[in-house]
Image (spheres, rainbow, N blue to C red):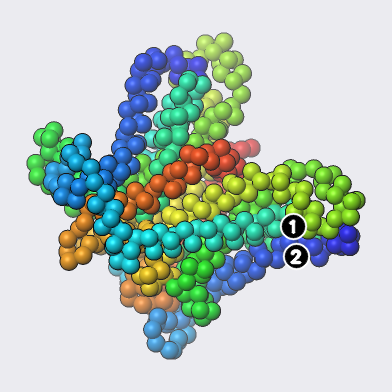
Amino acid sequence: VTAWRNPVSMGRVYTAPAVLIVLLLFLYPLAFAGWMSLHDWPLVGLTQEFIGTENYTSIPDNQLFVKAITYTVVYTVFTTIAVFAVGLALALLAQGQRPGAVFFRSMWFLPYVIGFGAAGLLWWALYNDSVGPFTAILNELGLVSGAADFFGTQFKGTASVIVMVTWKTTGFIMLVLIVALHAIPPEYYEAARIDGATPRQQFRFITVPLLRPTIALLSVISITGSLLAFDQFYIMTRGGPSSSTVTMVFAMYREGFVVFKLGSAAAMAMLLLLALLILNGVQIRILRGTVD
Amino acid sequence: MGGSSRRVLGTATYYLICTVITLAFLFPTFWAVVNSFKPRAEAAASPPSLVPEGLSVENNSRLAEYGDGIWLYLWNTVQLSVMTVVFTVIVSTLAGYGFARYHFRGKQLTFLAVLAILMVPFPTILLPLYLLLNDVGLLNSLVGVALVLTMFQLPFSVFMMRNAFESMPVELEEAALVDGATSFGALRRISLRIVTPSIVTVALFAFIAAWNEFLAPLIFLTDASKYTLPLALVGVRTGQLGQIDYGSLYAGITVAMVPCAALFLGLQRYYLRGLTSGALKG
């Protein structure tokens, strides 16, 4: 009972393990990443030399990373469009009360719980020219003769990855949109119908505006995820052909764990953090704006 | 929209479209499962057979012998997932209770610090974590990876548990306290039972995240005998002596997919609850 009378200390006690984890595994490494980015820091080797902002100023000279920035942004734009377009279409199909709608929802969501590792390998096999079904089907239909070479060019590799990512993640977008659609009061649609609005007009003037905050929030999640893409490229395209599908995190991974320049990799990581913070800030501002 | 989509689409068309989409979504998973049970030669045949001509478990038995043995990788994955679940549930339940029931100086700031984890991408703190784990002897250790994954589960889990305790009437606990229970005893006996659904949700998310995690084990586990399934499968894909063993790969992918799919289908209610509350309020 004494503990209850002294809530100050007990609150601290209960939150202590979480605080410890946050301090040791989050805030300390975060500060340390900033510190590392100011050093020449080889992975193997004993000395770390303070070099100020040199790791940052030399980023424009790093061809791999500079190319990766543009590539990741383009990838993010197309992935977000694909995932949203499919997700919205699926949400409109599965949001109703028809028998079976809940079943369809679960089936379309299912790939979301499969990891990028397993999903990437599975689709890599599906895209395989020798044993995969896609090439066989294209050959059968006469659309392609011989190898389809799904990872043969930057365009083909990127499109192949985006199809996999859409399959894997669009169910999440669908589900959250369905929850938001259900939150729209049915009276709005009734009133619109009485006023003679067509289904298309109802969609445009009721559904879309009321979904906007949800879409803004989903776009934060989706865009952040795409900008940090790594697993699917590491597994499916392996960055190729000739490093044309290397993402920012992939470039950072190479700098840190292949080239062993930890300081330079840390500078890239800090830049990535800064970009995401700015982007999330802007998106949250848009989100707030639409709520008001 | 329920009414209008009904008018736009006839019932037959609706079910036709939905069935086609469902088949398309299930096809990759179906393909992996079917091919994992084809005989070795058929699984590697070009062009592939759509309907298996023979059934066999030889892919699975070859997979069992891959590297240090698939059972070891499976066991590693189970260990990592269970540890992550246990750490996450304990830490977030305690913290959720503390945040919901007590006032203390710096509470808001502490809570914000937990949520801030969401804002920082994993790759940003990857390198320092690598050095830190190395310094404390937790590099190449499943415990080390589990701790890192726990940290990334905290924003969602603590938020979830705080809401669960906040929406529970204080009177229930006070009744227990009048009976002379300690604060911790009250938490354990009364509250935990009521917030169990939230704990299931938190555990489920932690399990799936750990089971599927790729980057953290890739960086923090340097010894192949510590590998989890996703990492080991990349090795299976690379193959031995330049020969890719497709049958084993399909079998491995199936083993990696099935637990998460089964957990989702079985505990869907808890999963969707977490998803909507996390996504809409977070």
| Residue named by callout 1 | B98
Residue at horizontal 54%, vertical 72%?
Answer: A29
Between the residue at mark 2 and the residue at mark 1, the CA separation in whole angstroms equals 8 Å
Which corner quadrant of the image does residue A287 belong to? top right
* Element under disc 1: helix
Residue at horizontal 51%, vertical 21%?
Answer: A97
Position of residue A199 in the picture relative to residue A60 (left or right): right
Q: Position of residue B277 (x, y in %)?
A: 60, 42
Give the amino acid at mark 1: Gly
Residue at horizontal 38%, vertical 52%?
Answer: B256
Q: Residues within 10 Å of mark 2 (few under 14, many from 20)?
A: some
Residue at horizontal 82%, vertical 44%?
Answer: B172
| Front position in the image: B71 or B270 | B71
Say if labels 2 and 1 share a chain: no
Chain letter behind tag 1: B
| Front position in the image: B52 or A232 | B52
Position of residue A148 in the picture relative to residue A15 (left or right): left
Q: Position of residue B261 (x, y in %)?
A: 43, 43
Chain letter behind tag 2: A
| Residue named by callout 2 | A13
Give the amino acid at mark 2: Val
* Element under disc 2: helix
| Front position in the image: B80 or A8 | B80
Can residue A21 be seen in the rendering of this structure?
A: yes
| Front position in the image: A142 or A222 | A142
Can residue A88 be seen in the rendering of this structure?
A: no
Vertically, is A56 above or below A103?
below
Residues tagged 2 and 1 counted as in contact (Cβ below 8 A): yes
